[in-house]
Image (cartoon, rainbow, N blue to C red):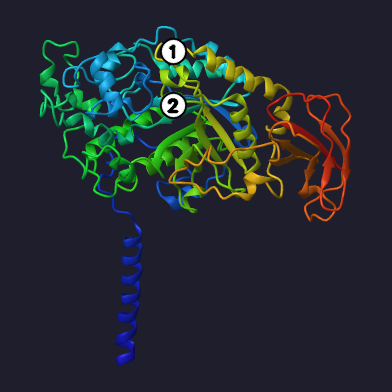
Amino acid sequence: MKNNLKTPFIYLVILATFINSKIYAQEVFHAPIGPNNEPQQSGKFEANWESLSNYEVPEWYRDAKFGIWAHWGPQCEPGQGDWYGREMYKQGSRVYNWHTANYGHPSQFGFKDIIRNWKAENWDPEKLVAMYKRAGAQYFFAMANHHDNMDLWNSKYQEWNSVNLGPKTDIIERWAQAAKNNDLPLGLSVHSAHAWLWYETAQQSDHEGPLKGVPYDGILTKDDGKGTWWEGLDPQALYAQDHPLSEEANDIATIHGQWDWKNGASLPTVAYSENFYNRTMDLINKFNPELIYFDDTALPLYPVSDAGLKIAAHYYNQNMKLNDGKLNAVLFGKILTDDQKKSLVWDVERGAPNEIQELPWQTCTCIGNWHYSEDYYNNDRYKSAKEVVHTLIDIVSKNGNLLLSVPIKGDGSLDDKEIKIVNQIGDWMDVNGESIFGTRPWVVYGEGPAVETSNPISAQGFNEGKIKFGSNDIRFNQKDKILYASVFGIPDQSIKIKNLGKSSQNAPKIKKIELLGSKEKVKWKVENDHLTVEKPNAAPNEVALVYKIYQK
């Protein structure tokens, strides 16, 4: 009898333990998205990491390798570089000093007034996207909003948008049409999840001087607008600063350690999270982009809110519905765990890993500052076309893609130095693009001094430029029975490739070698410990020589 009574009790304990384990496995969010918001497309994917891990990167993206990004918005108007809308509110910073000298004190002339000044009067999206395509871009990205929180389309959920203010046009709609006209997949980048933290400088004040303690305009409300140019608009819809400051908010660099909503970060409310969710869903539903870039750790507002998880599931499911059950979408995130890399494409900012990655990934970088900087132009600080091409070759050899930003001036145009760089990239691509597009990594990604030097990623990237490529650096990739060996520059003497020597376990049997862009016969010899390729009499370019190696 005892045993009969105890058995059901044991089963109940086991069942209760199982239920509790399932409950504890579920994430509890500080600011969850409620049911009365933009509806989600149902389908294969659910709003959790386990379900999203069923994602597979589409082959079209793996073939594309290279995209160009218009990282352009109202922060380009002053021409003072990135994070203007944050640093203009930090007394003593270079941007604050420039802003007060050119516009006045930020208690009177804030970022909302920069938006008003931004007109984009020389913007020609069709001309720019055509130029990017000619440079070899296989997809085009446009910034939909930045940390400054202004939406660059006719947004249903953000009155501070480019149709109501500034250029008074739907910028994303026009970018999307230009991409379609040039037969390029459309990517959209979304950065506004962090406006909550990013604008915290706007609710502070000078710490010294005649206006010490006078609050900046980040604390203004709709009622304060009576009789002003912005009457009827709510500044808090832009600045989102009706909340306590994060810990150490007086230190402008603290935000970098709080990017994942930890280390004393002020946590966003449900209303803020739902507004971000609805705006992003509106963007996706209006434009159906093939690619979406989130400037966030993992997904937007994660792990504070499930907004990012729900957006990701909706995006994948909707894309499948539009493509007869095939998933063609690409979604990017930063600082991903190994498991999260199965759910999204890993984006590395201004850097690259030092080995081949099993899963496709991407580098995002810029030839200058993220937002247009006159200093980069005046002091010749842009990356050269040669540097861009070397970066691309290195990334592709490691199973990655390159998303390159070319900063656009506030008026919507490129400067003459940028146009020259873009055209030079195109010149190299015209001849050597076959060694990039549609290729896959070889058994090793390369050899030479840069391979032998450690160059670890810092935070979300930021290791580019720490090692300089030279003519002794070689990168490999392949397509069908073709192996491409790219040499960074023009060698001083014959090229010796160790991985293609007889004794190398990687070496293929070589049938023929050609130098792309050259009609010279390539002289080569396979030796025991290397392949020797004689230096050409006339190099077809000064950027990177690409040898096309036919395998038997």
Q: Nearer the viewer, residue 323 or 186?
A: 186
Rendering coords of residue 265 (x, y %):
25, 45
Rendering coords of residue 175 (x, y %):
48, 17
- Residue 176, numbered label: none
**In which image quadrant can residue 19 be found?**
bottom left
- How packed mark 2 is, by other alpha carbons closer than 10 Å (few <14, some 14-19, many 20 or more), is many
Three-letter amino acid code at disc 1?
Gly
Three-letter amino acid code at disc 2?
Asn
**529 is higher (above) or lower (below) than 271:** below
Nearer the camera: disc 1 or disc 2: 2
Q: Which residue position holds label 1?
A: 412
Q: Which residue position holds label 2?
A: 369
Is residue 42 shown to the viewer in this render? no
State the CA–CA distance, disc 1 to disc 2.
16 Å
Q: Earlier in the sequence, mark 1 or mark 2?
A: 2
Question: Which residue corresponds to the image point at 71% horizontal and 50% vertical from the top-left?
Answer: 443
